[in-house]
Image (cartoon, rainbow, N blue to C red):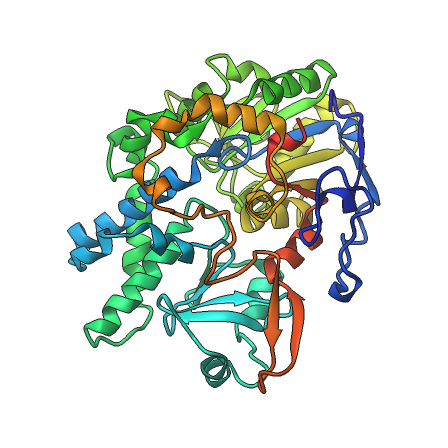
Amino acid sequence: MGSGSRHLHRDDVMCPLAATLEDSTCELQPTANVPLASATMSEYFSLSDCDVIGFDLDHTLCRYHLKETSRLIYESFARYLVEHKGYDKDLLNLTPATWDFCFKGLVVDLEDGNLVKLAEDGTVLRATHGTNDLSTEEIIKHYGPKREWKHFNSLNTSFTRSANYYFYDNYFDLPGALLCGRVVDMLHKRGNEVNSDFWKDMVAAIDHNYNTSAFKEDTGTYFPSVKRDPGRYLQPCSDSVKSWLHSMKNAGKVLLLITSSHSDYCRLICEHILGKDFEELFDVIITNALKPGFFSLVPQQRPFRTLVNDVEEKEGLPSLDKPGWYSQGNWPHLHELLKTMTGKPEPKVVYFGDSMRSDMFPASSFGKWETVMIVEEMEGEGIPKSDAAMSNEAQVEPLEKKGKFEEQGMKSPSAVSNQWGSYFVDVHRSGGGDEESQKLTWCCHCIHKYSTMAIPSVEHIA
């Protein structure tokens, strides 16, 4: 794409039902009846019109080996429950087939231990109790004849976290959905009542592995493992991605990196995927950005902080005066800096990210940025991989290195699930079971609503 001169029609890129990137006539089936973008977004989108190009790091600029990483994350959480909370050791035993359950976009209903897949209007398309499928009759018994999930409005309008449910929308916490299902199964087997108490333990497991100091102190299972063998989990950026970043920088674009990962982990990743001189690529690097609050909170609530040896200074900054590496922060102060850097009263910003809750929804709603969503499920459901991605994977992962799980058929978390179906569309059966209609999933609807376009990986644009 050079410095971004190619114009992309938004229908070219986000078309889960029939897409290849080259097919410019591709449109959603009319029955789907979904506006392909919010009214504020223009029909054509060109990177060359953007003054500022921003990137999330994890699962966006940095692709992970999803199978390896998912197994590590599952083990990190499960080990905590077994060793610190007295849960059954059996949680640590997984077969490759178990991974079919791991599917992005599920919501766990903490009040009853159900996991649900939602349609764009909030009806329940599929559901399980623990990891066991609920029949159409059971779904209607739980959710009424219209199969309505009662918390849909609060999730759909603001993506807020809740004591009643948890939305799994990124690969960092996704293995927790499988663990939740298995914990509910285990509670049942013991004859215990299923309520939201188990969730407190899940949150503690997440915090134990991902908290601020875990990287530095080598606590938990996750960070020590990635530090020991980064190549097992992280995919280096291809030369095409690196030269694309350089070409945008040379064309005078302002490049941002905004990640909720901490500075120490960010440095490890960037050195591995981009090289030791990665800082020269970006004008502004923001770590521990605490998205989505970065976009939605006012500066007083979340000031920028400077870092000294990866430790945040206590005093927040009154404003952001110059490019550099910062921690935490807020969109309004960044916006002021970008005005100065570009010399424009309203610089045009595009942001690449993989999370609906942390990236797409807040960047488009609060920041009014253009957004490009990285949706690995597009590749998982049939969009061909780019040549660059193919050759990069071949270099990174020689065949003899693939682990025993690969041969035994562990599903990648981005592939279609037998139990849950497609990430983008599903068949909806009415009460009688005779009427079948195709519905877009809520996740697919959100992609249309909050992202300017969607691509399977940064490789596809580079």
Q: With 65 as the anchor, is 378 left or right in this view?
A: right
Residue 339 location (% of width, % of height):
73, 28
Residue 311 visible? The answer is no
Residue at x-position 62% and y-position 20%: 240
Q: Is residue 336 above or below residue 309?
A: below
**Among the 4 quarters of the image, the one containing residue 122:** bottom right
Residue at x-position 22% and y-position 72%: 189
Residue 234 or residue 311, whichever sits in front:
234
Task: Indicate the quadrant containing the N terminus: top left, top right, bottom left or bottom right.
Answer: top right
**Among the 4 quarters of the image, the one containing residue 171:** top left
Q: Is residue 450 above or below residue 166?
A: above
Residue 460 or residue 36, whichever sits in front:
460
Residue at x-position 60% and y-position 25%: 388
Residue at x-position 55% and y-position 24%: 391
Q: With 268 as the anchor, is 299 left or right in this view?
A: right
Residue 56 location (% of width, % of height):
55, 35
Total numbered labels placed on residues in the image: 0
Residue 238 or residue 44, whichever sits in front:
238
Residue 67 location (% of width, % of height):
40, 41
Task: Indicate the quadrant containing the C terminus: top left, top right, bottom left or bottom right.
Answer: top right
Q: With 462 as the anchor, is 26 left or right in this view?
A: right
Residue 75 visible? The answer is yes
Residue 126 location (% of width, % of height):
51, 70
